[in-house]
Amino acid sequence: MDQPRNLTTEPESTILSSKKTVCVIGAGPSGLVAARELRKEGHRVVLFEQKHDVGGQWLFDPDVEKEDPLGRTKFMEVHSSIYNSLRLLSPREIMGYTDFPFLMKEGLGRDTRRFPGHRELWLYLKEFSVHFGIRELIRFNTRVEYVGMLEGNNGVCGDLGNDLKWVVRSRKLDDDIISSGNGDVNDVDYDLSIDRVERNGEVVEEVFDAVVVGNGQYSYPQLPSIKGMKTWKRKQMHSHVYRVPQPFQNQVVVMVGNSLSAQDISMELAGVAKEVHISSRSQKNLMEGFSKVISKHEKLHLRPQIESLEEDGRVLFVDGSFVVADAILYCTGYKYSFPFLDTKGLVTVDDNRVGPLYHHTFPPLLAPSLSFVGIPRKASFTHIQIIAFPFFESQGKWVAQVLSGKRKLPSPDDMMRSVQEFYRQREADGIPRHETHDIIQFEYADKYADKTGFPHLEEWRKKMCLVALDNSDVHLETYRDSWDDEELLQEALQSPHFTQHIGPIMIST
Ligand SMILES: Cc1cc2nc3c(=O)[nH]c(=O)nc-3n(C[C@H](O)[C@H](O)[C@H](O)COP(=O)(O)OP(=O)(O)OC[C@H]3O[C@@H](n4cnc5c(N)ncnc54)[C@H](O)[C@@H]3O)c2cc1C
């Protein structure tokens, strides 16, 4: 950006007082659709994206050398945790936003499978951004490094969120900055005067009426705490930086966790590694399909939790057994992280609970000027996947309409009471704090949609999702290539979602 700007004082926003200048952080599936909804509602949107293109997790990044293998940095250099062989967990038909079906496209470099590889979903998101003219709203290669309340608005009161404005500092990342890892907010000598927008080197400071955070939740590794982990000298890495199996050729690998990534990765490691030991805290939650795969492959072994890592390379398990390992691969999931966000303690991350958030979206004391999209996740124990994209769409719509005044939120006190009641209910149901945002999708998505008159998930979408989950549960190795829901597929393809008219979209592949 060449000219310093205070976006909130530009004429357009004063004429349209219910129209806000909104900063959206992240051009992944949630940020993209939120930006689209905000603009539809007449808001002025600037979408900040630290990478060179849209797609978020789906913008594959093979260059993992620049990342700490355990991801222990404030700002991650690698955002995407997608590995080379990754194919979608669910059939493409259920993935699309409501007004933009994820169609099969023939042509060079296109993947026409029902469960395509990750690149096909990235192309879909790219097409979405072109079709709805979102790209012109995006500042690529620009990382948001600070978001905080504009001074003078710092006292907490009931209406704080309505009057609040937000200071956003962003840094243009060029290739030198990315490769040198020079991205720490503390390295910069900021000019903190805020009424004027300052350029300080590559850092730009602007003021917005509202900020929508859509920075994703699958980039910052959640690591276990294991005795000896800090001193173990051999290779340790998190699945965040796993891309291909070849570096594990003939190695003895211990994988920690039995998540969906662990399942995929262990199956492909079985083809190259000497032995793969899957260490799992609880074997109760092992999917039937995964158990079958482990018992079939002679190189795959199920192990209990790790007791300690020893200097001589041994990995000791709690049942007293051990292996001498070359590498440990942590498939232990991800944690929410907002390294740029300063809310003066009004929003915190506590044991992976982001809160308080009214319906996982609005912090009661800062709403509606601060909001979050893309926080909900699957319910891990039931393996019920969220049908994410339509849900993100309904979130974006709600945020956009609340900001324009078309929809009203309850009072901050009422929102807070609702959050507390939600926490209380979860606790009563025995759900641990770190699963606060694991919400069972269908009922919740429909209830959430009612807030904005957003359509409920189609029955075929729900059924197709469940059929695919059941199939994966039993036939883990083959469910992406062999299925038994032909009737449902025909029903989907003849539904208004697939028969709606979408004009031609040209992008280079
Ligand atoms: C291995 C793996 C497999 C998955 N498989 C599936 C699947 O099959 N189906 C499914 O529905 N979901 C799957 N997911 C979940 C996937 O994350 C979601 O589909 C989706 O990408 C979430 O969208 P999002 O926009 O919330 O976050 P993201 O896709 O993570 O996008 C966030 C964006 O924010 C940007 N950003 C972050 N911080 C900043 C900053 N400070 N400044 C500027 N930009 C920033 C990032 O660069 C990124 O572009 C998978 C995830 C993983 C890790």
Image (cartoon, rainbow, N blue to C red):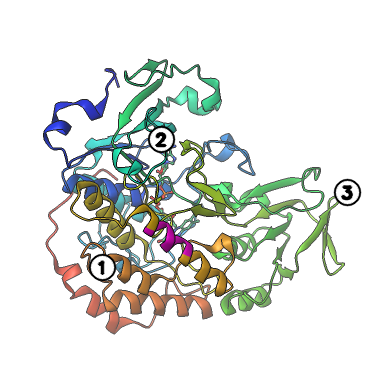
**Residue in front for this viewpoint, 479 or 333:** 333
Find the magenta span and give its range.
414-420
* Side of 275 relative to 336 (left or right): right
Amino acid type at circle 3 is Asp
Residue beneath the point at 73% across and 46% down: 235
How far apart marks 2 and 1 lie (CA) works out to: 33 Å
What residue does disc 1 label?
450
Quadrant of res 496: bottom left
Q: Are marks 2 and 1 in contact (CB under 8 Å)?
A: no
What residue does disc 2 label?
50
Residue beneath the point at 59% across and 52% down: 239
Q: Are marks 1 and 3 in contact (CB under 8 Å)?
A: no
Which mark's residue is nearer the viewer, 2 or 1?
1
Residue 182 makes an appearance in the image:
no
Is 418 inside the magenta-drawn segment?
yes
Mark 2 CB lies closer than 8 A to ligand 1 = yes
Would you call the spot at circle 2 few (<14 residues within 10 Å), some (14-19), or many (20 or more)?
many
What residue does disc 3 label?
312
Is 377 inside the magenta-drawn segment?
no
